[in-house]
Image (cartoon, grey):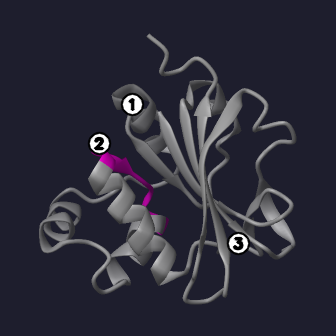
Amino acid sequence: MKLVICIDEELGYSFNHRRLSRDKNIRLHMMKGIRTRGGKLFMNQYSERSLLKDEGVLTPQERAERLKNPAKPGAEFLKDAQRENGWAFVENEDVTPYLPDVDEMIVYRWNRRYLSDLRLPEGVYEPFTVQYTESLSGSSHERVGFVRYIRKGAYEE
């Protein structure tokens, strides 16, 4: 499974029951990366509603497919992403039980601290190695860090 998540400096990804990922430039970057790398994107209804509102983030075909086959409520999408080795875009569900099955993490990191409702656990990066980093310009934040983590040994032959 591949995890896509937006976090703050304290590993928080939901603050005051609001999303950190509400940045159109970041969503465009995320979707471009998923299209390039291939695979199915899973998310819950909360995330899908927001993604559908962002004009130009989804292709017309992606939008039509999402409307035809809407996302499930709650955390069920994590089980589907796990089963199909897909991309799981997580904003407001506890991802901790699924972390052992994550082979890759795409992390968008805001250089801010928020009062978080949900956080990644301390030590979350220990089984991973950094494969790629980049600094992005967000629409809501001047700079957003982008890091691609790969589980150590996950892609070795």
Residue that numbered label 1 is attached to: 85
The residues tagged by marks 1 and 3 sit, at their Cα atoms, a distance apart of 28 Å
Which residue matches tag 2? 39
Q: On the rendered structure, is 123 left or right of 103?
A: right
The mark that comes first in sequence, 1 or 3, is 3
Rendered residue at 45%/72% (across/down): 27
Q: Is residue 108 above or below residue 59?
A: above
- Residue numbers of the magenta segment: 37-46
Q: Type of residue at label 3?
A: His
Where residue 124 appears, as percent x and y from the top left, is 77, 38
Q: Is residue 53 left or right of residue 93?
A: left
Q: Amino acid at mark 2?
A: Gly
Residue at image position (39%, 30%) is 85
Circle 3 is placed at which residue position? 17
> Tag 2's secondary structure?
loop
Contact? badges 2 and 1 (CB < 8 Å): yes
Of helix, strand and loop, which one carries label 3?
loop
Residue 49 in percent (x, y) is at 39, 74
Query: So how many labels did they put on this image?
Result: 3
105 lies above or below 116: above
Q: Quadrant of residue 100?
A: top right
Q: Secondary structure at mark 1?
A: loop
**Mark 2 → mark 1, Cα distance in angstroms:** 8 Å
Discs 1/3, front: 1
**Which mark is first along the chain, 2 or 3?**
3
Q: Are marks 3 and 2 in contact (CB under 8 Å)?
A: no
Structural distance between the alpha carbons of marks 3 and 2: 29 Å
Q: Residue furthest top?
A: 157
Closer to the N terminus: mark 2 or mark 1? Answer: 2
Q: Position of residue 154 (x, y in %)?
A: 53, 20
